[in-house]
């Protein structure tokens, strides 16, 4: 009886020792892995945000593709509306606004449509997979002297619900996200 | 006897009513250079008016005016630098109800989506007091946009695509392609 008990105790001690060593190895491996991955995926230094008190949004151009006027106007108006909503700027000037010339640290947003696929609301509703509208726009921010702060391609889509002009709203929202991320 | 006397008066009154009746109907030009278009949807662009608000578009006294209930937006016709018309289609059952029909059983909503009505679009750009460019897009009942454009041009608006006299539809209004912008 005693012999059996002592054997059981010995087995338990052995088991617990084995578990402790296993846990130790696991911790070491985990630490090594985390430090390794930390070295590999060190995030790049965040890009400094641009400081500007006002922005002028120019009329959307479409030099490369033929864009119907309602789309052009809706892109422009949605962009202005969504950028205003970010409240990043004291003034959001429209294209041609004389007051923009006196703004001290003005940023100008120029956009040019380089891709346009007019879908069909009818097709979207009937098939749910076809008829998407897509507008691809190249956007660039620069200062009064013409020095570029950076550029980015933005795509406005409407895939399921809504009329084709909803793609212009989607575009405006995405431009606003860029502004949120890029400006103080 | 009384009837015989009253008959010419009644006939004359009837003739007058038949003559002026259409002029009182909305959508008919009241006189040269003015226009009123009810059931116009302001898709985007007018300040102080919600997107896709349906109201009445009036072009008179050198001004384009859009009224939706108590809300009103004015644009001086002389400040309009471009007016273009277009044609399009929209769902017969629009708005939330139209959207909800999509979820109707057995694909009946998809079937309902096939019912569409033709509409006209009217797009314009104008310049505000400080030189800022604005863009406005309207959609309106089929056949209304040309009259609205004519009225705007008569009131002092400018366009890059003038309306050819007697042209139906105008050069700026391509044939409907059954697509909504």
Image: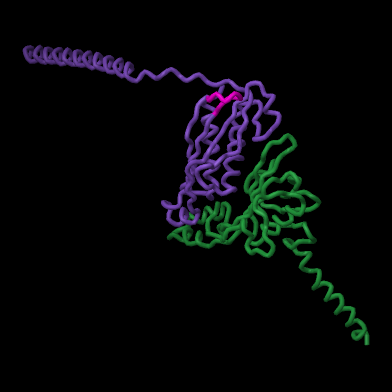
Q: Does the magenta stretch include residue B108?
A: no
Residue B143: horizontal and vertical position, in percent? 65, 62
Residue at image position (58%, 61%) is: B118
| Left or right: B76 in relation to B10 | left
Q: Is residue B170 above or below residue A150?
A: below
x and y percent of residue A148 in the render? Answer: 53, 25
Q: Nearer the viewer, residue B66 or A53?
A: A53
The quarter of the picture where residue B172 lies is bottom right
Residue at image point 60% right, 44% down: A73
**Residue at 33% across / 17% down in the picture?**
A38
Magenta stretch, residue numbers = A141-148
Rendered hue of chain B is green
**Chain identifier, purple in the render:** A
Q: In this view, does A4 lie to the left or right of A95?
A: left
Residue B118: in sight, yes or no? yes
Q: How many labels does the image show?
A: 0
């Amino acid at each position: 009886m005693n012999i059996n008990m002592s054997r059981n105790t010995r087995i338990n001690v052995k088991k617990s020792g084995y578990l402790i060593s296993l846990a130790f190895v696991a911790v070491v491996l985990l630490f090594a892995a985390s430090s390794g991955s930390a070295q590999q995926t060190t995030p790049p230094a965040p890009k400094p945000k641009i400081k500007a008190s006002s922005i002028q949004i120019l009329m959307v151009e479409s030099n490369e593709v033929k864009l119907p006027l309602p789309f052009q106007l809706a892109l422009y108006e949605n962009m202005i509306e969504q950028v205003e909503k970010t409240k990043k700027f004291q003034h959001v000037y429209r294209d041609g606004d004389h007051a923009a010339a006196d703004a001290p640290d003005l940023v100008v947003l120029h956009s040019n449509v380089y891709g346009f696929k007019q879908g069909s609301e009818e097709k979207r509703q009937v098939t749910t997979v076809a008829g998407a509208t897509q507008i691809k726009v190249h956007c660039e921010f620069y200062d009064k002297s013409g020095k570029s702060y950076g550029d980015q391609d933005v795509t406005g889509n409407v895939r399921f619900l809504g009329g084709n002009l909803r793609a212009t709203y989607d575009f405006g929202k995405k431009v606003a996200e860029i502004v949120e991320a890029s400006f103080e | 006897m009384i009837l015989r006397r009253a008959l010419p008066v009644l006939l004359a009154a009837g003739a007058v009513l038949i003559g002026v009746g259409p002029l009182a109907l909305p959508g008919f030009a009241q006189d040269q250079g003015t226009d009123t278009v009810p059931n116009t949807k302001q898709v985007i662009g007018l300040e102080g008016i919600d997107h896709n608000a349906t109201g009445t578009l009036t072009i008179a006294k050198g001004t384009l005016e859009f009224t939706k209930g108590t809300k009103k937006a004015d644009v001086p016709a002389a400040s309009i630098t471009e007016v273009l018309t277009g044609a399009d289609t929209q769902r017969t059952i629009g708005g939330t109800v139209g959207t909800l029909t999509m979820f109707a059983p057995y694909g009946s909503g998809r079937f309902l989506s096939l019912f569409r009505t033709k509409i006209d679009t009217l797009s314009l750009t104008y310049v505000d007091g400080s030189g800022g460019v604005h863009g406005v897009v309207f959609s309106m009942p089929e056949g209304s946009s040309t009259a609205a454009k004519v009225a705007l041009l008569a009131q002092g608006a400018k366009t890059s695509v003038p309306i050819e006299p007697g042209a139906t539809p105008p050069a700026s209004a391509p044939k409907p392609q059954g697509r909504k912008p």
